Image (cartoon, rainbow, N blue to C red):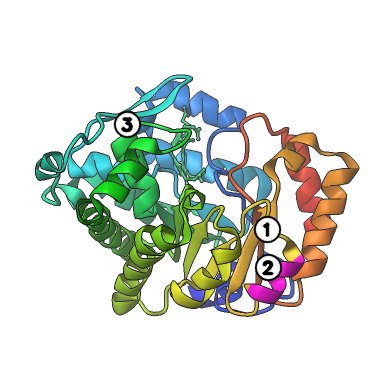
């Protein structure tokens, strides 16, 4: 099937579709037993990301089981700092670890020289997926937004309050601009190459955008994402871009009007009616079922799905969660959800 005729792409381009397309953030990995099996056969998480055979397999697993309308390539947002030359590793049961940037001098050690050669396994995975996916399934490429990636680069891993990164930004804003710019440039090149390898749309995850006051949100989240999207559109104007500025609350309409994204991912706490009136009137919306409702199941899951569908179905809409699917999600609840959406 031609890309422009796929359900997900039509929704991204602003069409109200006859059926609601559905996929789940973080659907590859995490909650599937077959993922854990493949994961155990790799030398580590990054090895899995950089082994096209295994990454293709893990990407296809949720499609085989559930037939989602879209497939997101298996990788991680932290391959960008890794490709730029920063030390990145994943600790079992802990999560990602990086050798943190200590001063602007550390930026000298990071460069674009090996960007594409380092990331070539991801490009190969994408190319193979276009061959292997069902003909109607849309292939999504992705990257982290500069701020979300830089937060890991400075904090050295996950963080509760982003104190080091935010203090750096507020006390040396020009230095912080340089770090964000470096990552934005690398991300633009990475996403363009993903598209040229076969990705039919790309999603930018700004998972930690919700921690900033407004002026900083504009400078370090909105502006760099806008620049990345403009960079992509300059080369591939027909490719829709999804932005997920999680947690930005009443700044969502600003992202809808100014980022240049074709669609926004809505987080769990946004009111659907408010989002319909203030966001869906400008761009396609994607979301926003609470991942814990999918863990709990039962009648509250059904009611929440019905209410989301009823609110958004008059405009361009893609059903998804308000954040990534949780590892403890029962597979039966995903089946229940799909039955409810598809009727
Ligand atoms: C912040 C962030 C990261 N990675 C990602 C984000 C943004 C989205 C979000 O907010 O959820 C994005 C991501 N990470 C992964 C994907 C793959 C495709 C998909 O299924 O969506 C995607 C899109 C695989 C992964 N990335 C990771 C795993 C688990 C690794 C394992 O198998 O041990 C997977 C399947 C590891 C990872 N990677 C990261 C963390 C914090 C962790 C540890 C905790 C966790 O599991 O999420 C960084």
- The residue that label 1 is drawn on is 270
- In this orientation, which residue lies closer to the viewer: 207 or 105? 105
The residue that appears at 60% across and 59% down in the rendered structure is: 249
Q: Main secondary structure of the magenta part?
A: helix
For the residues bearing labels 2 and 3, Cβ distance under 8 angstroms: no
Task: Say what secondary structure mark 2 lies in.
Answer: helix
Lower sequence index among marks 2 and 1: 1
Q: Is mark 2 within 8 Å of ligand 1?
A: no
Which residue is outermost to the front? Answer: 171
Q: 193 or 265: which is nearer to us?
A: 265
Residue 102 is situated, as x and y percent measured from the top left of the image, at: 20, 34
Distance from disc 2 to disc 3, alpha carbons, whole Å, reads 34 Å
Q: Are marks 2 and 1 in contact (CB under 8 Å)?
A: yes
Q: Is mark 1 within 8 Å of ligand 1?
A: no
Residue at the spot 14% in from the left edge and 39% down from the top edge: 106
Q: Is residue 25 visible?
A: yes
Instruction: Say which residue appears at 76% left-offset and 77% top-offset.
Output: 314
Quadrant in which residue 201 is drawn:
bottom left
The tag earlier along the polypeptide, 2 or 3, is 3
The relative height of residue 308 versus residue 169 in the rendered view (above or below) is: below
Tell whether 58 sits left or right of 126: right
Q: Secondary structure at mark 1?
A: loop
The span from disc 1 to disc 3 (Cα, nearest Å) is: 30 Å
Q: Kindly state the secondary structure of the residue where label 3 is placed.
A: loop
Q: Quadrant of the C terminus?
A: bottom right
| Residue on which the image places disc 2 | 275
Horizontal arrangement in the rendering, residue 212 relative to residue 169 (left or right): right
Q: Which residue is mark 3?
A: 156
């Amino acid at each position: 099937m031609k890309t422009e005729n796929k359900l997900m792409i039509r929704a991204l381009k602003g069409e109200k579709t006859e059926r609601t397309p559905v996929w789940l953030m973080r659907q590859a990995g995490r909650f599937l037993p077959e993922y854990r099996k493949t994961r155990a056969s790799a030398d580590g998480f990054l090895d899995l990301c950089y082994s096209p055979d295994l990454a293709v397999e893990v990407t296809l697993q949720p499609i085989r089981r559930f037939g989602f309308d879209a497939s997101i390539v298996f990788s991680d947002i932290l391959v960008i700092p890794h490709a730029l030359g920063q030390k990145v590793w994943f600790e079992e049961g802990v999560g990602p670890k990086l050798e943190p940037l200590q001063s602007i001098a550390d930026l000298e050690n990071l460069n674009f020289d090996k960007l594409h050669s380092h990331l070539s396994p991801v490009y190969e995975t994408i190319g193979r997926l276009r061959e292997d996916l069902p003909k109607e399934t849309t292939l999504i490429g992705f990257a982290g937004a500069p701020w979300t990636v830089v937060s890991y680069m400075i904090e050295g891993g996950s963080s509760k309050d982003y104190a080091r990164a935010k203090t750096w930004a507020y006390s040396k804003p020009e230095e912080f601009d340089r770090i964000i710019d470096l990552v934005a440039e690398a991300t633009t090149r990475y996403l363009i190459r993903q598209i040229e390898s076969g990705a039919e749309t790309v999603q930018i995850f700004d998972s930690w955008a919700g921690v900033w006051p407004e002026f900083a949100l504009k400078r370090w989240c909105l502006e760099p994402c806008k620049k990345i999207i403009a960079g992509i559109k300059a080369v591939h104007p027909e490719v829709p871009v999804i932005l997920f500025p999680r947690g930005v609350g009443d700044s969502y309409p600003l992202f809808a009007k100014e980022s240049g994204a074709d669609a926004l991912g809505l987080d769990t706490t946004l009111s659907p009616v408010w989002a319909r009136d203030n966001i869906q009137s400008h761009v396609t919306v994607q979301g926003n079922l609470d991942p814990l409702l999918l863990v709990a199941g039962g009648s509250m899951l059904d009611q929440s799905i019905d209410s989301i569908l009823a609110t958004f179905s008059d405009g361009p809409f893609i059903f998804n969660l308000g954040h990534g699917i949780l590892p403890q999600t029962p597979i039966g609840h995903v089946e229940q959800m799909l039955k409810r959406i598809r009727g």
